[in-house]
Each structure stands twice: as C-alpha cells, then as structure tokens.
Image (tube, rainbow, N blue to C red):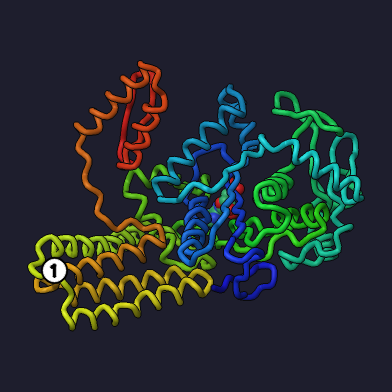
Amino acid sequence: MKFYNTLTKKKEEFVPIEPGKVRMYVCGPTVYNLIHIGNARPMIVFDTARRYMEYKGYEVNYVSNFTDVDDKIIAKAIQEGVSADEVSTRYIEECKKDMAAMNVRPATTHPLATQEIPGMIEMIQTLIDKGFAYDVEGTVYFRTRKFDEYGKLSHKNLDDLRSGGRSLLVTGENQKEDPLDFVLWKPKKEGEPAWTSPWCEGRPGWHIECSVMSKKYLGEEIDIHAGGEDLIFPHHENEIAQSECCNGKLFAKYWLHNAFLNIDNRKMSKSLGNFFTVREIGEKMDLQILRFFMLSAHYRSPLNFSEDIMEASKNALERIITAVDNLKHLEANAAVEALTESEKTSLEAMKQYRVKFEEAMDDDLNTADAIAAIFELVKFSNTEADEKSSRAFVEAVKREITALADILGLIVDRKEETLDSEVEDLIAKRQEARKARDFARADEIRDELLAKGIVLEDTREGVKWKRA
Ligand code: AMP
Ligand code: ZN
C-alpha cells in the first residue's frame, strides 16, 4: 500500500511504526457553524482510508479533534448572546449527525481542545524550558528560527518566508523576536473563555492543540497525519515544529492532504453565494450520493461540485444499487441451490475485479479507479447472473458488490422507505420515554430514527422531523 507523502513529495510504501497497527490523526473542524461540503471531503476521504486499512487487517487508532475554542466560535457566541461552550456543543452534535448521514464512522477518539488545556500548558512549558519558546507579557511565542527543519513539510525556505512574506507575517505584534514566530498562548480579551496558566489568564493558539491531542491519544510518534491541503502551511508546519522540538522525535511519518472542493469551478465562499452546508445537500438528496461523488475523484485532485455532476453521481450510484436489487430478486426466486461447474469458473473470473479494486486503493487510495472496478463487476453481474443462475452464484456476486462498496463506506442496499406513521409512532414513544426520564431510551430512539435517515429537532412548538 502506497501513500503520497507531502513530506517527501513521493509515493511511499506504507510501513507502520508498530506492525499491524496504525496511529492516525486527522485535523477536524472548528465548530462554529454547520459543516460545509468542503469540510466533508477530508472526513469522507480519510474515513475511507481508515476503512481500507482495516480491510487490509490493520488495527487503526483514528483520532480527530473538534476545535472548540477559536475566534469564530467566540464571535458567534457574542452575536447570539450565549456562551462559546453552547455554540461549540451545539455544532459538535450537528456535525456528528452529518457524519452519520454520510456514513463517516466516529473516530476512536474525538478530543475537544477545551478538555486538553493542562496538556497544552505542559507542552508550552517544555518548549520554553528547552529554549524553543518565550513569553512576552503573557503571550508565548514559538521561536521558529530555532528549529532548523522548519519548512520541511511545505518545502518553504525560511529566508524566503522571512523576506517575501513580511507584510503577511507582521501583524502589528512588534513584541515578537521574529515575524515568523507564532503564538502558543495568548491573553484573554474581555468576555472570552480563559484558563489560568503560568503566563496569564488566556487561551492556547490553534496549532498547539493538535500537537498535544495527537501526543496524548496516539503517542509521540504517529504513522499518519492528515487534513486539507490548506493546513500544510502554517498549521501542520507549526505542529511539526512544536512536537519535534518538545519530544525530540519525528512527529508523523506520512502526511496526507486532500485537495480542495470547488463549486462551479470557483472557490466556495459565502460572499459568492456558492456555499453549501452538508445539511442543505442532505435535504435535497441522500448523502450517500455526496459520498460517492467525493470518492469518484482522486483525493489529491481538485474536485468540482455542480448540479450536473451530482445528477451524474446519483445515476451512477443508482446503477450499483439497481444491480444489487436485481440480484436480491434473483436470489429470492432461484430454482437451483448449488453452484454449477460453469458458475464456479465464472466466480474464479470474478476475482479479477477485487484485484483491480485493491490495486487501485493500494496506489495512494485511488478511489476513482476502485469505483471503476466496481462498475466492471456490476457489468459482470448484469451479464452473468440471470433467472437460470443458482442461488449460491447470485448470492456470491451480490456479496462481492456489497463488500467492495462497503470498503468505500458506500451503502448499496436500497433503503426501505420508512412510513410517516412509523416515524410518528417512534417520536411518540420517545416523548413517553422522556416523560419517564428514561433519557437513554429517548436517545436510543433518536439514533434509531437517524439510522432511518430521519432527523429530529426539538423546538418550542414540539418535536419536528425531516428526512436527512
Ligand atoms: P476548518 O474547520 O476550516 O479548520 O476545516 C476543517 C477541515 O476541512 C480541514 O481539514 C480543511 O482543510 C478542510 N476544508 C475546508 N474547506 C475545504 C474545501 N473547500 N475543500 C476541501 N477541504 C476543505
Ligand atoms: Zn490540526
């Protein structure tokens, strides 16, 4: 299995630090709003990487944080007149719902930055003790030029950065020793969440969060660190500087970055009006289609979102689902039970599609070619399986299609339509459970409904529901 490593700019064979195990960290979203479809790309892509590695037999410890202390969260809280904690808690819940609807599995651990402040203070103190950081009136900066290897991930030269990026780097913080130095800890402003530290009442900088959470949940050396390509510089570069200077060890062996998602060939932005949340898309279509669309391109290629492309994705996914439907029908009506000799030969030939699928995935997670292999298998199914086929044969072909789709996290079993009356019934049961203060049961029912694609919203006027 090969991955393209941003650190070496090469495709490299994946060799884990500990045989059979993978320690993987994926930078998660800042939770001040519903996630947008750009945020969904790393979620889907790296969830697929995790699924594939598990399929290959690795035990994957997958950690992905929620950044729950940040300027944008504070701004939103002020705007709404609520606490920052209320904003982040709300959007973490919403993000988890979107992830479930996209069939993105929960991480092994989803750490929250605000729960890890003691670890951050400890790492910052170590960096100060080792001479890699300094305190100026309560603000602690990382002494970038002290780390010889700074720039190794983004392949930037420190001198170029210093001269070329001066206007960009100097933000009125004259107190810094060098424009390239970045913040590890900063004093609070009025009304902001803050923690006591040896330097001042304040809060951590963004970069230190990931260094600390990665170390706590995965150890000082990890196999894979991933995120969107916008994070390469400065976020990941700074994470490397902090972790490697603190721990004296290589931080991560493989750095994986997804390219951006654009809309109608333009950068997604609120001001251009081409900004979509995952929730909005989910209201229009099954989010399996969004997942399929994300995987239909290589994760390192820019991906363009448009209505036409989504329509094409819907039709393509439908072709797989229809093939599985047909196989189910044939299975139920098959006259013969056991495999015939010619079917045995045919199943031998069928193995080539899995080989192609694995070859594609082994080549830096080429999901586009892996999906092409599934389509070849669908074509095989459509020509080889018919009313005369044995049940065993039909079942084997169906199992093969669903198994390969499942590695990509694609559900190709047609969802049974849930009747409105069933939903109402479950909502009533949930209300009863809540009245009886059986909140565990109430949550269970909510999750059950979510699995059927029904999202509940508790409003002042009562419980409202919609199909995700
Ligand atoms: P943020 O909440 O902005 O830190 O983003 C969370 C994750 O989403 C990061 O890994 C970003 O790189 C990624 N991301 C944000 N926008 C896009 C986009 N348009 N396309 C692909 N990835 C994105
Ligand atoms: Zn990060």
State the image coordinates of residue 270 (x, y, percent, origin top left).
51, 45
Q: Amino acid at mark 1?
A: Glu
| Viewer can see residue 302 | no
Which residue bears the numbered disc 1? 337
Residue pictured at 64% horizontal, 31% vertical? 74
State the image coordinates of residue 97 (x, y, percent, origin top left).
43, 40
Residue pictured at 84% horizontal, 60% vertical? 162
State the image coordinates of residue 55 (x, y, percent, origin top left).
45, 64
Q: Which secondary structure lies at badge 1? A: loop
> Looking at the rendering, which quadrant does residue 370 occupy?
bottom left
Taking depth in this image into account, of 126 and 7 the one nearest to the observer is 126
State the image coordinates of residue 428 (x, y, percent, origin top left).
27, 23
Residue pictured at 75% horizontal, 29% vertical? 195
| Viewer can see residue 58 | yes
> How many numbered circles are shown?
1
Taking depth in this image into account, of 61 and 74 the one nearest to the observer is 61
